[in-house]
Amino acid sequence: MRSRLERAGVPSSSYRLATLDGWALRTLKTFPRRSGIDPRRLELVNPRTDYPAIKHAAAALLGGKHINDVLEASYGRVIVDEYQDCGLEQHGMVCHLASVLPTVVLGDPMQEIFSFNGAHPDWEGDVCSAFPPAGELSTPWRWIRADARGFGEWLLEARRTLMAGNQIDLRDAPPEVEWVQLDGIEDDTKHRKACTVRSPQAGGDVLIMAAGNQKDVQRRIARETPGAVTVENVDLTDVIAFAEQIELDRPGDLATVLAFASEVTTGVNRAELMNRVAVLERQAERKVATGAELAAIAYKTTGSAEDLVKLFLALESNPGARTFRPEILRTCIQALRSCLQGAPARSSTPPFGSAS
């Protein structure tokens, strides 16, 4: 969504982009007493139980009309994309917002991928009754732009077939579709081969989709597939979680930093680097220290934001290293640089604690 807004030339000052859960969390942090939520829920110590409580409290806060004037003063309208993946309480939140602000929801029940997260509103009975349909795309513009109109039209017809409760036969699919049947024999090899398929468009990208709740699988595929990177959630919760573990300007927590680095960049051998640092600190090693080892020692000594940034960059510069979660690492580095003396503060970056 952010990239589409940027391509359309919409200035970032004209919109606020967030997930519904992220927006609910920030709203409750702004009005904790009014919402009545247990403040400990807002720390997300246990996301599995905290997020449902947050959504419930946010829906109640909005339903009570306690912040209608704030909403009217803050936003001109609300647009919710991928509405088919909204849960019941998220739907309740949006309905309350719609009573205050002009609201548009965009979605396709055939593209629902998060049903494993709990009950969803009925599309016809709940969604369409609250937001009467304004139109349905009937031209496959995305595929026309990719010079694959025939494939796009096949997808539209397949959608109509499935919506009618019928089945499609992939053996009759157009040449743009290749079905690789997994039969338990060398499935991993087949997965790897599929992940290395090149885009037919010059400079085009390839989207590798894994089950939405299997983050470990997604990251393993990105780590093992040359050139692949992950698509991160808007709220970048992993960066926030890391920031909460780090205290700046005191001896650096090298183990935690290397654990985080190994989850975003390949070639980070935590045990080996920790051992090398210990040996070098004892001055018991004749082998010349690498740039990453020197950076690790410097960060461990000072714990400063500057040395932590240098360590991340040194690890990224190791021979053969590749950052497969670039958005996570770049956001983290940006946040750390904002902690440096004289750097302009950015409210969008996660806070790193500093020893007083």
Image (cartoon, grey):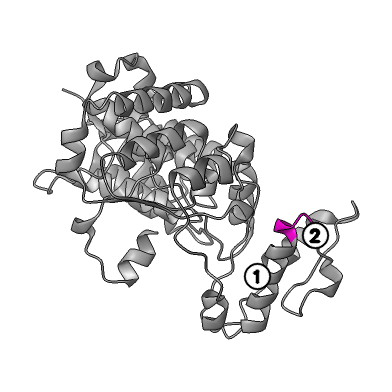
- Residue 267 visible in this rendered orientation of the protein: yes
Residue 17: numbered disc: none
| Crowding at mark 1 (Cα within 10 Å: few <14, some 14-19, many 20+) | some
| Crowding at mark 2 (Cα within 10 Å: few <14, some 14-19, many 20+) | few
* Image point (56%, 75%), residue name: 140
Quadrant that contains the C terminus = top left
Picture coordinates of residue 133 (x, y %)?
48, 56
Q: Amino acid at mark 1?
A: Leu
Picture coordinates of residue 81 (x, y %)?
44, 53
* Image point (62%, 39%), residue name: 115
SS assignment at label 1: helix
* Image point (46%, 50%), residue name: 232
Relative height, residue 172 to residue 270 (above, below): below
Residue beneath disc 2? 189
Magenta stretch contains residue 64: no
Badge 1 vs badge 2, beta-carbon distance below 8 Å: no
Q: Amino acid at mark 2?
A: Thr
On the rendered structure, is 334 left or right of 287? left
Q: In front: 156, or 328?
A: 156
- Residue 250 visible in this rendered orientation of the protein: no
**Range drawn in magenta:** 162-167
On the rendered structure, is 348 left or right of 168? left
SS assignment at label 2: helix
* Image point (80%, 61%), residue name: 190
Picture coordinates of residue 332 (x, y %)?
33, 46
Residue beneath disc 1? 156
Marks 1 and 2 sit apart, C-alpha to C-alpha, by 32 Å
Magenta stretch contains residue 166: yes
